[in-house]
Image (cartoon, grey):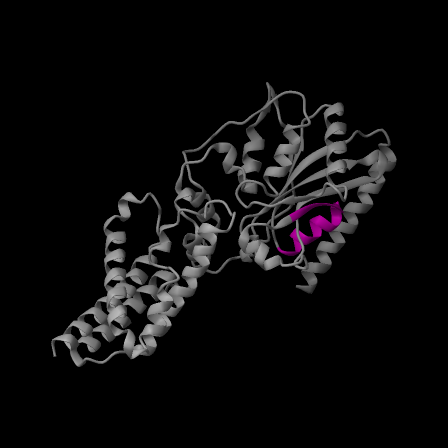
Amino acid sequence: MKKKSFLIYSLIFLYSFLNFSLKAQNGDSLLQVSLLTASPGEMAYERFGHTALRVKDKSKDLDVVFNYGVFSFNTPNFYYRFVKGETDYILAAVNFPYFLTEYALRGSRVTEQILNLTPEEKTKLFEALKLNAQKENRVYRYSFLFDNCSTRPRDIIENNINGKVNYLNPGPEVTFRDLVHSKSDVDPWLTFGIDLVFGKNADKTISYRQEMFLPEILMQAFETAKIDDKPLINQTNILVMEDSDKEISPLNPLLSPLFVCWSLFVLILILSIIDVSKNIQFKLSDTILFGIAGIAGIILFYLNFISVHPAVDNNYNCVWLQPLQLFAAIAIWVKSSKRILYYYHFVNFVALSVLLLCYWFLQQVFNAAFFPLIGVLMLRSLTYIIIYKREKRF
């Protein structure tokens, strides 16, 4: 890693030296604006890549990157605001070498697309970026799907050119979930979590313009786009090659959500058979299962009804993960609550059965690992119903 870092910084120093020499020889060089796209990294928050705008003027010793993807964990109530969907990002202007170093060190490819704009359009765009980067203007309300580091550069470019940008849609219709999966599927547990919080709105077909919330989609769109009849991109350069040593190791199949959840289902099935045949209640396991389901239900309830995050409402996962599951986790230890707990489990079993029977009509995609988990809750509710009925007979 030390050798790699030394090499990267050496290359950046060489780049800066050559750039300085070129400035001396080309004092009359014009302003250049380009779109920078960084490929996904290994960390969960890096999976979707990044976009920024570079403004360069050799005659003025200018080489700056306008980055819409900056935020601070020190913001008051950051985590609460993040869950609620009220995260504020800022537009920050940084020197180009610093920006390039960050992505070179993490092994991401950085692609530069030089915009084919007139001198007047470049100047207008640069002035708009400088105005947007001022302290009173730089903060914006971030939205992962609709207003992010990818859509902001696109919009400011479109708003500061003469003419209309026409995009050539190259592919079939997709949904937000499809596109998120295309980046998260290398991490099955990340996909599992995303599928848990995404509701049915994430499964609606979206426009090509909406697809551009992903940096790599925007890059592809710009490559074939035209301003009226003129190509939007003048030249494409690879500034940093993707690290050939960067490999995301596939998850061990035995640790995948699907295998873990089906293993849990088999274990609970065995416990339930023992429960029914031996008339033994595994209260601790029920407390853990329904307790986790109830806590997850509180989170989903908050996202569904309070949060302003897009695509997390109308979520049918709230049927099997809902706050009242906590009642089942606690009431099993209270003898006087047996009867009401029986009614709860009866309603819960019916609700989950209806959910599975109506799944194909819900228009929401469930992660395959959800089905054994739903089965686990159904098994425990059914077991309690059988045991309660047997006790009432005797």
For this rendering, which residue is in front, 88 or 10?
A: 88
- When asked about the image quadrant of residue 388, the answer is bottom left
Q: Residue furthest front?
A: 336
Residue 224 locus on image (x, y percent): 55, 28
Residue 234 in view (yes/no): no
Report the side of 254 relative to 62 (left or right). left
Taking the spot 27% from the left edge, 65% from the top edge, the residue there is 344
Quadrant of image for the N terminus: bottom right
Q: Residue furthest left?
A: 393
Report the side of 254 relative to 46 (left or right). left
Residue 339 locus on image (x, y percent): 24, 71
Residue 359 locus on image (x, y percent): 28, 48
Image height of 387 relative to 317, above or below: below
For this rendering, which residue is in front, 59 or 324?
A: 324
Quadrant of image for the C terminus: bottom left
Taking the spot 16% from the left edge, 72% from the top edge, the residue there is 389
For this rendering, which residue is in front, 334 or 194?
A: 334
Residue 307 part of the magenta segment: no
Q: How many marks?
A: 0
Range of magenta residues:
89-106
- When asked about the image quadrant of residue 59, the answer is top right
Report the side of 283 relative to 86 (left or right). left
Residue 112 in view (yes/no): yes
Residue 47 locus on image (x, y percent): 53, 52
Image height of 247 relative to 109, above or below: below
Taking the spot 31% from the left edge, 69% from the top edge, the residue there is 264
